[in-house]
Image: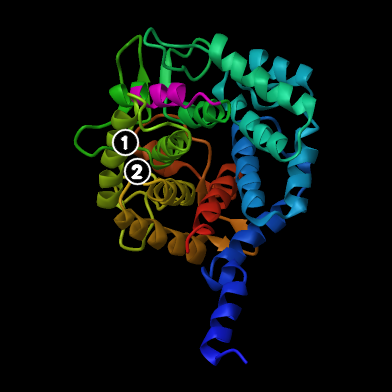
Amino acid sequence: MLPRFLIGLLLLTALPGSARDPYLSRWRSVADRLITTPVESYPFNWGEGVQMIGLMKTYDRTREARYLAYVEKWAARFPLTEVRRILREGLRSAGTQPGYCGHWSPATAIFYLNQARPNRERRRVAEEVIEFIRKEAERSDEGALGHWQGSHQLWVDTLYMACPLYVAFRQPGESATQVILFAKHLQDERTGLFYHMWDWQTGQRSPELWGRGNGWVLMSIADTFDGLPARDPRYAPLREIAEKMARGLRATQDGDGVWHTVLDDPKTYAECSATCMFVYGLLKLVRLGILPASERGPALRAWKAVNERYVKDGLVTGVSAGTGPGDRAQYNARPVGVETWGTGAYLMAGSEADRLP
C-alpha cells in the first residue's frame, strides 16, 4: 500500500490547472462563453484577430476541440478573394483605410489554426497577408511599418499586427527590426515606456505613455523572442528594450496590481486590456529567460487583480474602446466595457499563467 503522503502527492498532480491557479477556471469560462457567441459578429479586423489568437493559445494549452472548431468556423467566412480586397481597400463596415494594419492580425490566428488543422485555403490567406506586409505596406525611409497607406506614422499598435506573423513565418529578425526601429522614435529614455505615435514627415510625437499601446509592444517583444536566436545581432538590443520596459512597468503598476490607461498618471482609470497584455508579456519573457524571475511577481499581482476586478460570468470588462493618439484627457475619456481585444488579451494572459508550475 502506498504511503498516505505519496497518495496525496499523486492526487495533487492529477488535478486540473485550477488546483495550481485558482483563476484558471475563470480563464476557461471566458473561452467557453466566447464560443457561444455567433461567429458572424466578428469581422476580419484587429480586435477580432487578437480575440482568436487568444482562443487559439487557449486551445494550445487545453486541447479543447470546440475552441479549435469555433476559430475554424470564423476563418471559413473569409475566402482569399475577400481578404485580398480588405487588405487593399479597407473594411467598408468599419470605415478602415486601404493598407490598414488592423487587417493583419487575423492572419496570425488563421496561421495558428492551420498549424493545428492544415487547410490549403487557410494557408494561402496567411501567406497573402504576410506578402502584403512585406511588399505593399507603407514604410518609412528606414523601413518601419506605417499604420495605413498614406499615414506616414508609426503607431505602436502596428507592431502587434505584424510581429507575431513575421515570427510564424520564421522571420523573427524582421520582427525584431521593427521593434528596434519603433523604439528609436517612440521609447522614452527616462521611463523605458513607449509613446503612442510618431509622424516621420513632421517629426512630431504624441505626448502620452498609453497603457494598451505599451501592451502591444511588450507582447510583440515576447513573441519575437519565441523565434529569435541568441546569436542574432538584434537579440541584445531587443533584450535591452524589454528590460527598460520592465523597469518602467514596475514603476507605474499601482498598489492593486493593475496599470492605468496613461501609465504615468494614476488619476486616469485602471485599464484591463493593458494589464492583461503585461501579464502575458512579462510571464512569457520570464519563461524564455529574457527577464529575471523577479518580474513574475508584478505579473501575478496583475493576474489576480484582473480576475478579481474584471472577470465575471465569462466576460472580461474594464476594457477601453478603440483609441487613437491624443492627450491624456482624450485617453481618460474613452469608454470602457467588453471588447474583443480585451477578451483576447485575457485569454493570452491565461495561456501563460497555465504554464506556471
Query: Which mark identifies residue 290?
Result: 2
| Span of residues in magenta | 170-180
Horizontal side of 83 relative to 299 (left or right) equals right
Q: Earlier in the sequence, mark 1 or mark 2?
A: 1
Quarter of the rendering containing residue 11:
bottom right
State whether residue 193 is above or below residue 182.
below
Q: Position of residue 294 (x, y in %)?
A: 30, 57
- Residue at the outermost left position: 190
State whether residue 215 is above or below residue 102.
below
> Observer-nearest residue: 53 or 306?
53
Residue at (30, 18) in percent of width and height: 204
Q: Position of residue 206 (x, y in %)?
A: 33, 26
Residue that label 1 marks: 239
State whether residue 304 is above or below residue 174.
below
In what quadrant of the picture does the N terminus appear?
bottom right
Q: Position of residue 106 (x, y in %)?
A: 64, 31
**Is there a contact, CB below 8 Å, between mark 1 and mark 2?**
yes
